[in-house]
Amino acid sequence: LNMRMVQFRLTDPEPLLYHNEPILRNGEQVGFLTSGAYGHSLGGAMGLGYVPCKGEKPTDVLASTYEIDVMGVKVKAEASLKPMYDPTSQRVKV
């Protein structure tokens, strides 16, 4: 694969994401968010974007550090290749 869609969650709950915010991987701009919204269940802004990863394993993509540039301020972000909101339904209460 040349690109992977990565889900991001900002570690600071205050900033909001819309789309087109720059994605920084290990301090270098590598792309832009394609969408963004606030994840109330996750307590922070969420975004999706494509990250170049030619010849890399998924673990290499996730091992990087990520920041999202929100109106000129670099905000640390967690990255995931799977949905962050309870992908295995472990938190479902009956």
Image: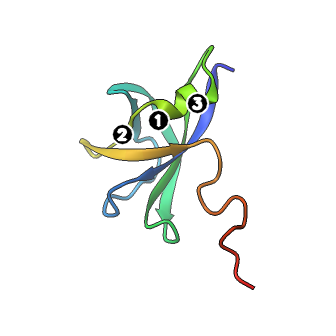
User: Which residue is under mark 2?
Assistant: 67
Between 64 and 13, the one lying in front of the other is 64
Amino acid bearing label 3: Thr
Relative to 18, does residue 42 appear above or below in the rendering? below
The amino acid beneath tag 2 is Glu
Rendering quarter of residue 51: top right
Q: Residue at x 32, y 57 (%)?
A: 12
| Sequence-earlier tag: 1 or 3 | 1
Residue 1 is situated, as x and y percent measured from the top left of the image, at 69, 20
Disc marking residue 32: 1
Q: Is residue 93 left or right of residue 70?
A: right
Q: CA distance from mark 3 to mark 2?
A: 18 Å
Residue reaching furthest right?
94
Q: Along the polypeptide, which appears first: circle 3 or circle 2?
A: 3
Q: Residue at x 58, y 30 (%)?
A: 59
Question: Which residue occupies the extreme left position in the image?
Answer: 73
In the image, residue 41 above or below residue 35: below
The C terminus is located in which quarter?
bottom right
